Each structure stands twice: as structure tokens, then as C-alpha cells.
Amino acid sequence: MPTFVYMTRCDGCGQCVDICPSDIMHIDRTYRRAYNIEPNFCWECYSCVKACPQHAIDVRGYADFAPLGHKVRVLRDQEKRMIYWKIKFRDGRVKEFDFPIRTTPWGSIKSPSDYAVPDASGLGAPELAHEPTALEVEALPMLPPSGKTKV
Ligand code: SF4
Ligand code: SF4
């Protein structure tokens, strides 16, 4: 279900380019509009759809598993700090959800280069670089030594 851009709505601001975790939203050099350079690598994460201030991005369902036409619409309301989802199922049912936008301000998350270079001894540890500090928790949940999770 790759994304596509309505060219007449896009103003080339580049927010979708900045946020795409798959790095596939690019700005066309001739037309100065965004486009998905590699639809097969789209994670369908909807990050670009939510980020686009012009509501210029949509996600196309592949016909093999969405043959009867479902619809997923998402709208980010920056003033109310809410994300609104509207899901239309193939049988006509409609479900709507809304969620608050995360509380971290836009652009405030530190990049890896803002952290100190990790110690090489961390290569033998189970945590990823800068965990758990970057996750703002004291420690990651761990399995007990038996390997069985407690219920
Ligand atoms: Fe990138 Fe996610 Fe948008 Fe796909 S849905 S183009 S992976 S931001
Ligand atoms: Fe165009 Fe929207 Fe991407 Fe901005 S975020 S470049 S308006 S598609």
C-alpha cells in the first residue's frame, strides 16, 4: 500500500522527506513536488500522511487484498494536537478514532550525533546505543533468568 502525492496540493515543503523512515519521499527537481521514489519500500507507516500540512499524500491499497475499496483517512490537527483516523471497511462499516499527538515538540528529538559516542564495550550488551537513557527510562524490561515471562 504505497503512498502517492496529489501534485496539485503539494507545495514542496519537504516535511514528508524529513520524516520518512524509509527515505523514499523525495522532491522532484524539475517540478519541486514530492513523490515516492520506491513504492515497494514503503512501510505504510503513514508518518508522511500525518506530517503533510497540505494533506497532499494518500496511501493506495493494492488491488489483490483491497479489491473492493477500503479507505483510510488520517488528519493531523496541529492546533488541537490531535490525530484523527477514519477507516472505511470494504463492507461499508466506518470506524473513527482520535489520538493526542505525542507531547514532544516537533523537531525536539535528539539526533544520534547529539549523544556521546558509545563505548565499544557496549557491543556485548543487549541494549542498543544510548538505551535506556534515550528512551527516558531507568532500565529496559528484562526476562527473568529462567527465560519465562511472569504472568
Ligand atoms: Fe515513508 Fe511511511 Fe510515508 Fe511510506 S508511509 S512513504 S514509509 S513515511
Ligand atoms: Fe508536498 Fe506534503 Fe511532502 Fe510538503 S509534506 S513536500 S506538501 S507532499
Image (cartoon, helix red, strand yellow):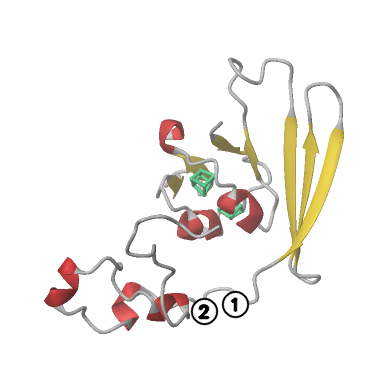
Residue 103 position within the rendered picture, expressed as x and y whole percent measured from the top left: 65, 76
Quarter where residue 112 is shown: bottom left
Badge 1 amino acid: Thr
Say whether marks 1 and 2 touch (CB < 8 Å).
yes
Disc on res. 119: none
Horizontal side of 34 relative to 141 (left or right) equals: right
- Which residue lies most toward the left here? 120
Horizontal side of 108 relative to 59 (left or right) equals: left
- Taking depth in this image into account, of 6 and 111 the one nearest to the observer is 111
Task: Give the residue at mark 2.
Answer: 108
Residue 20 position within the rendered picture, expressed as x and y whole percent measured from the top left: 47, 53
Secondary-structure class at tag 1: loop
The answer as to whether callout 1 falls within 8 Å of ligand 1 is no
Residue 117 position within the rendered picture, expressed as x and y whole percent measured from the top left: 21, 80
Q: CA distance from mark 1 to mark 2?
A: 7 Å
Q: Tell me what residue is drawn at x 39 percent, y 81 percent.
A: 133
Quarter where residue 127 is shown: bottom left
Horizontal side of 9 relative to 137 (left or right) equals: right
Disc on res. 104: 1
Secondary-structure class at tag 2: loop
Mark 1, other Cα within 10 Å: few <14 / some 14–19 / many ≥20: few
